């Protein structure tokens, strides 16, 4: 059995994953596309205390490298099968829905997507996709997936959305989603940004800024690109903080939309006054 713990940023996935790993003889596989990279610690909210539980695909890729969903699929399946072969429970935890689906369903990716669309805007690409696949669920800003879907149509002469409907689950899997009231989630997101600064985010971002590395790994996570604007003198530090909070809230909203449309999660409303109660509710559901 494989367990998935998904949900928006800041909702409590890490704490629940550690609890379930302890109770269900589990080992954890990261399913966050930013946490795979080394040196991106505070802004990506990497787990600080692993409680001696093995973690995989966490802090393992150099920030100069381009780690694709194809790479993740291959690596995640390796660790899922390895953990299962040892009689333990793989627990995928994270907010990158495409990573989770790529690992668990019979998605087909190639190591390098064909790309004949250099210099074409996302809006135009998206319109091209809608013309051949009006039922697509791919987001306007997900350029890589739009190109993949266009290439799939070119090769197969049928919409990628039809392929998605035929995708099959490869493992016996329980899908858990954590959720909470929007105002509570936004409060926790705002508070977490302040905590990141208290933990040293400004220094972490400045070291990256001074390195002159501007790869996708560095420019994707919320936190660094906003602070780079501060270091460039474009905005104040307080404006950078507020931009981080705003972007994190918007990201959480997009995550909800994706999970609700793409995955059949069993949602649990988090009790933050007594998170132990939520943990036990999830555990009892899994055991049943």
Image (cartoon, helix red, strand yellow):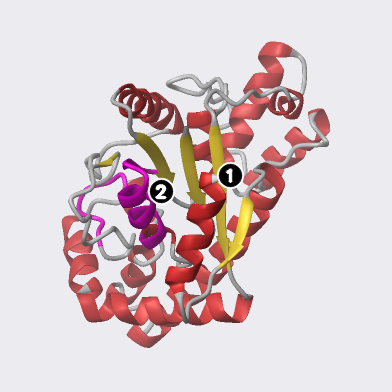
Q: Nearer the viewer, residue 180 or 261?
A: 180
Q: Which mark is residue 59?
A: none
Q: Nearer the viewer, residue 213 or 13?
A: 13
At horizontal 49% and vertical 44% (from top left) the residue drawn is 4
Q: Earlier in the sequence, mark 2 or mark 1?
A: 2
Q: Residues within 10 Å of mark 2 (few under 14, many from 20)?
A: many
Give x and y (percent) for residue 277. 48, 70
Give x and y (percent) for residue 131. 82, 33
Residue that carries the numbered disc 1 in the rendered image: 142
Looking at the image, the residue that sits furthest to the top is 156
In the image, is 142 to the left or to the right of 199?
right
Q: CA distance from mark 2 to mark 1?
A: 16 Å
Give x and y (percent) for residue 267. 62, 57
Q: Secondary structure at mark 1?
A: loop
At horizontal 74% and vertical 34% (from top left) the residue drawn is 129
In the image, is 234 to the left or to the right of 57?
right
Q: Secondary structure at mark 2?
A: loop
At horizontal 29% and vertical 75% (from top left) the residue drawn is 196
**Bounds of the magenta span?**
15-41
Residue 32 in the magenta stretch? The answer is yes
The quarter holding residue 73 reads top left
The quarter holding residue 165 reads top right
Quadrant placement of the C terminus: top right
Query: Disc 2 vs disc 1: which is toward the camera?
Result: 2
Residue that carries the numbered disc 2 in the rendered image: 32
Residue 218 vs 186, above or below: the answer is above
Residue 1 vs 227, above or below: the answer is above
At horizontal 24% and vertical 81% (from top left) the residue drawn is 198
């Amino acid at each position: 059995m494989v367990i998935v713990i998904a949900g928006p940023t800041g909702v409590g996935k890490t704490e629940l994953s550690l609890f379930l790993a302890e109770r269900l003889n589990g080992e954890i596989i990261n399913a966050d596309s930013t946490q795979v990279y080394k040196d991106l610690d505070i802004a990506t909210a990497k787990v600080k205390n692993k409680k001696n539980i093995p973690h995989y695909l966490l802090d393992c890729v150099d920030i100069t490298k381009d780690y694709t969903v194809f790479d993740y699929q291959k690596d995640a399946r390796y660790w899922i099968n390895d953990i299962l072969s040892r009689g333990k429970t793989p627990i995928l935890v994270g907010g990158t829905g495409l990573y989770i689906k790529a690992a668990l369903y019979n998605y087909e990716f190639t190591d390098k997507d064909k790309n004949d669309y250099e210099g074409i805007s996302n809006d135009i690409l998206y319109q091209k996709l809608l013309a051949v696949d009006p039922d697509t669920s791919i987001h306007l800003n997900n350029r890589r997936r739009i190109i993949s879907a266009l290439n799939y149509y070119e090769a197969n002469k049928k919409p990628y959305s039809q392929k998605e409907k035929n995708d099959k689950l490869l493992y016996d899997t329980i899908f858990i989603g954590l959720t909470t009231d929007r105002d509570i989630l936004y409060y926790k997101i705002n508070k977490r940004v302040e905590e990141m600064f208290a933990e040293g985010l400004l220094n972490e971002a400045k070291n990256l800024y001074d390195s002159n590395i501007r790869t996708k790994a560095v420019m994707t996570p919320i936190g660094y690109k906003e602070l780079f604007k501060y270091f460039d003198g474009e905005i104040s530090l307080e404006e950078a903080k507020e931009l981080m909070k705003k972007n994190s809230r918007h990201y959480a909203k997009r995550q909800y939309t994706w999970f609700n449309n793409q995955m059949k999660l069993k949602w649990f409303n988090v009790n933050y006054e007594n998170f132990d109660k939520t943990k036990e509710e999830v555990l009892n559901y899994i055991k049943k």
